[in-house]
Amino acid sequence: MRTLFTTALLTTALLASGALHAQDVQERTIKFGHLNNTDHPVSLGVKRFAELVAAKSGGKLKVQEFPSSTLGNELQQQAALQGGVQEMTAPATTSLAGIVKEFGLIDFPFAVGSFAQADALLDGPFGQALIAKLPEKGLVALGYWDLGFRNVTNSKRAITKPEDFEGLKLRVIPNPVFLETFKALKANPVPMAFGELYGALEAKAVDGQENPFSVILSNKFYEVQKHVSATNHVYAANIVLVGKRFWDKLSPTEQRILSEAAQEARAYQRQASRAAAQKAVGELQAKGMQYNEVSPAEQGRIGQMVKPVTDRMAASYDPELVKLYQSELARTAR
């Protein structure tokens, strides 16, 4: 009898727990906007995230994807999250330097040498310290996804040495590190929203741009650019963001579902992104682009030319975060 009574109690508790869990998850539609096309690895990550969220919530939480800048550029979507009219986005971390300038550390050229180092840096104490600065700005971050190493394309000439940058009008992300880096190389950097870029390249309002190979391919820049040079000057990451106004409305169970889904989608997204980058080089060449690599010696020369920029920028950042960044770079280089 005692055993039966204990079993009945446990069953009642489990049923109550399940009911409580069900009550903790409401029917919600989450608008997830981003800049990339539906064949891009960021979109693949959003789709995997949506599947995981649906499975974990019993179909109650629905993620609706809005790709290809349909909800606006990076800063417009950021403002929409802060204002509570959009729930999620996954921009490049570069777009956050306007509200937390230390995100600019991620963009320091020639700092990160491998994907393994990038993952360790961003998933570790440094990346988490940056994330901790976002809630006071109206944003919550659920981790970092892969965008890849950035490379230069242009319609004028191959980039094989630092002197080749001179006079090139290059579109850059509206971010101080990028602006100052290309000024140091004597290029003419033009800050511009990503959604305007193809038209500017087509009209020859700018000579070139810089992005990971998969972005170059997905956005058909091969139609309006002749040269693609493997400068690998910056490792770029996307960051999965939720508007804090929306986040604060969620139950702890719903918050846990979103956090777990973003983390689980991360490994898949990174793998898909890196495979796509490797494949994209051959596809760009097949589409008629002239591809070249930059020798380690010339990369070293470019790095030396831009070092005064990063030194100057670092001096204007939170000293504790700079120290953490430098120590984590050293630790993860092993």
Image: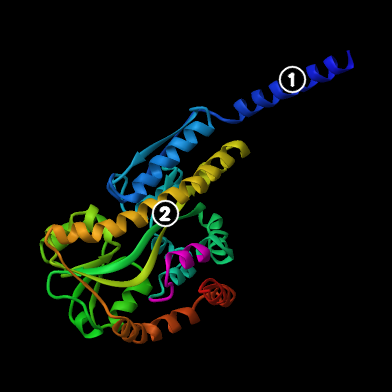
Q: Crowdedness of circle 1 by 10 Å Cα count: few (<14), some, many (20+)?
A: few
Q: How is the image coloured?
A: rainbow
Residue type, numbered disc 1: Thr
User: Residue 55, how many percent across, how many down?
Assistant: 50, 32
Q: Is residue 90 visible?
A: no
Foreground of the two, 275 or 219? 275
Distance between the Cα atoms at labels 2 and 1? 41 Å
* Residue on which the image places disc 1: 11
User: Residue 210, how many percent across, how many down?
Assistant: 26, 67
Q: Crowdedness of circle 2 by 10 Å Cα count: few (<14), some, many (20+)?
A: many
Foreground of the two, 75 or 111? 111
User: The magenta stretch spans which residues?
Assistant: 110-121
User: Residue 207, how many percent across, how many down?
Assistant: 15, 70
What secondary structure is found at the residue carrying circle 2?
helix
Q: Are marks 2 and 1 in contact (CB under 8 Å)?
A: no
Placement of 289 over or under 25, stated as above or below:
below
Foreground of the two, 138 or 293? 293
Reply yes or no: does residue 249 show up in magenta.
no
Placement of 271 over or under 163, stated as above or below:
above
Q: Which mark is residue 232?
A: none
| Horizontal side of residue 281 vs 97, given as left or right | left
| Horizontal side of residue 198 vs 127, given as left or right | left
Kindly indicate the quadrant of the structure image that contains residue 112: bottom left
Placement of 55 over or under 131, stated as above or below:
above
What secondary structure is found at the residue carrying circle 1?
helix
**Residue placed at 44% from the left, 79% from the top?**
313
Q: Which mark is residue 270?
A: 2
Counting residues from the start of the chain, the first of labels 2 and 1 encountered is 1
